[in-house]
Image (cartoon, rainbow, N blue to C red):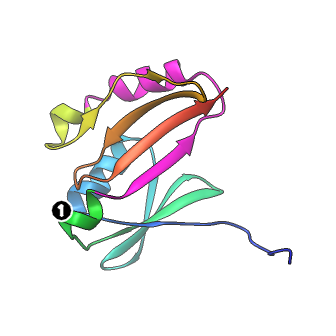
């Protein structure tokens, strides 16, 4: 069967919904409210996810999202580093770039503990 899919979106939680909205806006994502307790967050027009005003520690701290970068992971990491997210948003963490057999990646924890993998494949 061929699926007539147009996009796929995950749902992630927020410990402090307004803080998470600000975090993703500072990161350069476009946040649009769809209800009082949920927003759709666009990375670009065809790539988005849902941010919910809902928090369960075990859920958020076990949620992972992998965002494949088109090219130049180092420049993207530098652009995120200069934002100073760990200084502006308690609980956020930014790793250095890790070099793996399959490619390279770095990690960013959002304020709720959701773990982002930003990477590029060899």
Query: Which percent across, then down, holds residue 117?
Result: 45, 41
Q: Where does label 1 land, which residue?
A: 16
Q: Is 45 on the left-hand or right-hand side of 23?
A: right
Rendering coords of residue 43 (x, y %): 53, 50
Q: Is residue 30 magenta?
A: no
Q: Residue at x 27, y 56 (%)?
A: 20
Q: In this view, does 62 lie above or below 89?
A: below
**Mark 1 element type:** loop
In the picture provided, is 2 more to the left or to the right than 112?
right
Quadrant of image for the C terminus? top right
- What residue appears at the point 86 percent right and 78 percent down from the top-left corner? 1
In the image, is 56 to the left or to the right of 122? left
Q: Quadrant of residue 59?
A: bottom left
- Picture layout, residue 110 above or below residue 94: below
The residues colored magenta run: 62-84
Q: Mark 1, residues whose alpha carbon is within 10 Å: few (<14), some, or many (≥20)?
A: some
């Amino acid at each position: 069967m061929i699926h007539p899919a147009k996009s796929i979106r995950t749902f992630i939680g927020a410990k402090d919904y307004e803080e998470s909205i600000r975090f993703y806006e500072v990161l350069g994502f476009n946040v649009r409210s769809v209800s009082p307790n949920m927003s759709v967050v666009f990375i670009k027009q065809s790539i988005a996810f849902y941010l919910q005003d809902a928090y369960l520690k075990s859920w958020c701290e076990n949620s992972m999202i992998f965002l494949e970068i088109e090219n130049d992971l180092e420049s993207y990491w530098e652009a995120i580093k200069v934002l100073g997210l760990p200084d502006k948003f308690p609980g956020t963490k930014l790793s250095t770039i890790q070099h793996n057999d399959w490619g390279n990646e770095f990690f960013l924890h959002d304020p709720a503990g959701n773990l982002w993998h930003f990477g590029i494949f060899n």
